[in-house]
Amino acid sequence: MRKHFTLLIIIFISLQIIPQSKIEWFPSGLNIQPFTANFLEPKTGFSYLISESNLRLDIGTSADVLKIKDEGKISSLGVDLFTYTRLRSESNFKFPVETTDFYFGLNYAQKYFNDENEYGFRFRFAHISTHLVDGSYDIQSKIWRNGRLPFVYSRDFFELLPFYKKNGFRVYAGITYLFHTVPTNIGKGIYQFGFDKYFTNFPSSIITPFVAYDFKLSKLDKYIGNNIVSAGIKFGKYDKKGFRIELNYYSGKSVHGQLFDINENYFALGFNMDL
């Protein structure tokens, strides 16, 4: 406790040294916009898994708490809080909830920019836990669907994603280090790269087509790649808040912790609010 208190004092004193005109508390918008095809990003909306009879509901937010501006540079400290939930589609407009995942953490970002391009990085420290929900339980037979029983699943990790952006095209590559996992046979390292491209020369200033791709290489007994390809239209400024309609293709291990060892391959039609 004493160490944590000392750290807070050091941070407070450091902030007082910075000219107050350069500090903005609880600013609007994000220093670095979420990476479009990266699954672990805050968003609010839903996706229909075509041919899978499933839906995914995303409810999340990310907010910069502190922003420090300098000439050609912006630093920020923020928080991330979101869930992603798998639902099953049934008749009579019923959607039993099968499993849900919880993500919360902190992020620090630095962005350098000039008239032509920008570059920087985002660092995150976060926790994920997941749970089977009552939609996975068959009340009549009193058994869990597909023979899957609830178990403890959690991940605590650090993530570093450097990026470079120019003319609506952003490329990134990084690494995630899982310093604590349950189950323990999940590999410690996740290696990632991807890009998003927004076609900013589109005639309308508030309608922007985009394409994006994300690849993650992780280990579960052996190394396996997860791919997400995304294409669609964003309504609103391409690098600001807005609304996206997109078609996604996913292949690899399930994004849901309770299904972490299942291979999935599907298209999904998504409707999401951008922060």
Image (cartoon, rainbow, N blue to C red):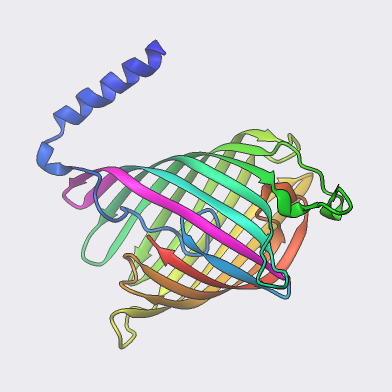
Q: In terms of depth relative to the viewer, which is nearer, 99 or 4? A: 99
Q: In terms of depth relative to the viewer, which is nearer, 241 or 186? A: 241
- Residue appearing at x 42%, y 58% in the figure: 34
Task: Say whether residue 252 is left or right of residue 76.
Answer: right
Q: Residue furthest top?
A: 2
Task: Say whether residue 267 is left or right of residue 65.
Answer: right
Q: Residue furthest bottom?
A: 203
Residue 18 rendering spot, x and y as whole percentages: 15, 33
Residue 180 rendering spot, x and y as whole percentages: 63, 32
Q: In terms of depth relative to the viewer, which is nearer, 100 or 193? A: 100
Task: Say whether residue 74 is left or right of residue 134.
Answer: left
Quadrant of the image occupied by residue 186: top right
Q: Examine the rendered structure and indicate whether residue 146 appears above or below residue 65.
A: below
- Residue appearing at x 25%, y 54% in the figure: 28
Q: In terms of depth relative to the viewer, which is nearer, 90 or 58? A: 90
Quadrant of the rendering where the N terminus is positioned? top left
The dominant secondary structure in magenta is strand
Q: Examine the rendered structure and indicate whether residue 223 appears above or below residue 171.
A: above
Q: Residue furthest right?
A: 141
Q: Within the magenta stretch, is there residue 74?
A: yes
Residue 147 rendering spot, x and y as whole percentages: 87, 50
- Residue appearing at x 61%, y 62% in the figure: 56
Quadrant of the image occupied by residue 135: bottom right
Q: Within the magenta stretch, is there residue 275?
A: no
What stretch of residues is rendered in magenta? 52-76
Quadrant of the rendering where the C terminus is positioned? bottom left
Residue 63 rendering spot, x and y as whole percentages: 35, 48
Q: Exactly how many numbered labels are in the figure?
A: 0
Q: Examine the rendered structure and indicate whether residue 91 appears above or below residue 219.
A: below
